[in-house]
Image (spheres, helix red, strand yellow):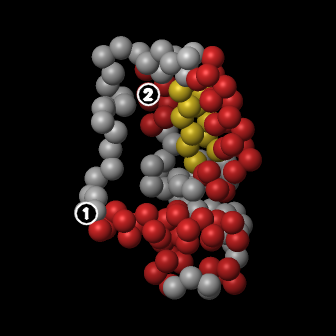
Amino acid sequence: MPVLVPFVKNPTLMAQLPPEDAEKLEGLTVVQTQKVLEWYREVVIPARASAYRLNVEKRTFTFDIDKLAAPFEKPTLILLGRQDTHVGYRAGWDILELYPRATLAVLDRAGHALGVEQESLFRALVNEWLDRVEENI
């Protein structure tokens, strides 16, 4: 796994969070901006509370993504953060052959919150993928 090194540090912003939340946010992201802080407050904190209430221990797919019976022949988008220390990015290469219609993008300057840290690029890639999906309907 890559080492998490913040590219945009903002101690004043991080001080707005309780120390435990600031530590968790620092473990997810490499960009400390107001938008990332708002995402953490509005999405991550409530999601964690719900997960604990529901006793969600393991988050997995309903199938094994790297052991398909046959290649998945539909448009696929695999987005990974180059600095993601939770999931990493290298395994994306390992499964690519199983998804012949896949776009694989490893976004620099992005940890586990790549949709917020690299929002414009993330949206462009998702929109392009949605266009390909619509072509196949």
- Give percent across and percent down for residue 123: 69, 43
Q: Residue at x 63, y 17 (%)?
A: 135
Write down the quadrant of residue 49 in the picture: bottom left
In the rendered image, the vertical position of residue 41 relative to residue 80, given as above or below:
below
Residue 84 x, y percent position in the rendering: 53, 53
Taking 74 as reference, is 26 above or below it? below
| Image quadrant where one finds the C terminus | top right
- The residue that disc 1 covers is 55
Q: Residue 18 in the image: x percent, y percent?
A: 51, 85
Say which of 129 and 102 sits in front: 129
Name the residue: 45% across, 49% down.
87
Residue 9 visible here: yes
Picture residue at 63% right of the left edge, 29% below the top: 129
Foreground residue among 114 and 95: 114
Residue tagged 2: 95
> Disc 2 on helix, strand or loop?
helix
Quadrant of the image occupied by residue 122: top right
| Vertical arrangement, residue 2 with respect to residue 133, above or below | below
Q: Residue at x 45, y 37 (%)?
A: 91
- In the picture, measured across the screen, residue 120 lies left or right of residue 111, that is right
Q: Nearer the viewer, mark 2 or mark 1?
A: 1
* Mark 1: secondary structure: loop
> Which tag, 2 or 1, sits closer to the chain's start?
1
Residue 27, above or below 101? below
The amino acid type of the residue labelled 2 equals Ile
Q: Which mark is residue 136?
A: none
Q: Amino acid at mark 1?
A: Asn
* Disc 2 from disc 1: Cα separation: 30 Å
Farthest residue in the front direction?
Answer: 137
Q: Is residue 97 visible?
A: no
Q: Residues within 10 Å of mark 1 (few under 14, many from 20)?
A: few
Q: Crowding at label 2, few (<14), some or many (≥20) Cα neighbours within 10 Å?
A: some
